Image: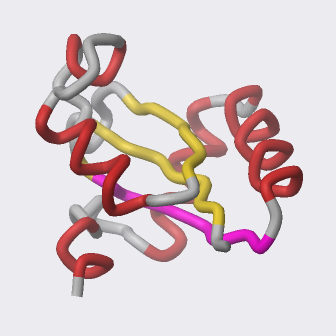
């Protein structure tokens, strides 16, 4: 089973959210449809801008916790390394 660590954004330079899941398509859909009330639904954070895949949950959770401690500038660099325009990657993983 794969585990994904991901970053969502409301827009470039907007609010961001770091999460972890074992079903990224389902989880991002939940964020996008505001199925669960909370931070992402409150601030309309729905754009998948970055993700990494791990083979075990411990590694994924460790990485998520690490990223949550990072400064915003570091997260921005991480996103822009492979996604300089902050494009929504959701459609590309649904195929």
Q: Nearer the viewer, residue 63 or 95?
A: 95
Q: Residue at x 26, y 37 (%)?
A: 31
x%, y% of residue 87?
23, 65
Q: Residue at x 20, y 27 (%)?
A: 35
Q: Is residue 49 magenta?
A: yes
Q: Is residue 80 left or right of residue 65?
A: left
In the image, residue 70 sits, relative to residue 80, either above or below, namely above
Q: Residue at x 64, y 62 (%)?
A: 3
- Name the quarter where the C terminus is drawn: bottom left
x%, y% of residue 20?
59, 45
Report the span colored magenta: 48-55
Q: Is residue 76 magenta?
A: no
Q: Is residue 43 left or right of residue 40?
A: left
Q: Residue at x 45, y 32 (%)?
A: 17
Name the residue furthest bottom.
Answer: 95
Q: Is residue 49 left or right of residue 44?
A: right
In the image, residue 50 sits, relative to residue 1, either above or below, namely above
x%, y% of residue 15?
34, 25
Name the residue furthest front.
Answer: 1
Instruction: Specify the quadrant of the image occupied by residue 22.
Output: bottom right
Q: Is residue 19 left or right of residue 11?
A: right
């Amino acid at each position: 089973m794969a585990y994904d660590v991901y970053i969502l954004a409301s827009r470039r330079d907007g609010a961001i959210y770091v999460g972890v899941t074992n079903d990224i398509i389902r989880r991002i859909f939940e964020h996008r449809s505001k199925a669960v009330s909370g931070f992402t639904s409150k601030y309309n954070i729905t754009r998948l801008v970055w993700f990494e895949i791990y083979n075990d949950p411990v590694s994924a959770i460790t990485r998520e916790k690490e990223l949550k401690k990072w400064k915003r500038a570091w997260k921005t660099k991480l996103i822009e390394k492979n996604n300089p325009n902050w494009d929504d990657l959701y459609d590309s993983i649904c195929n």
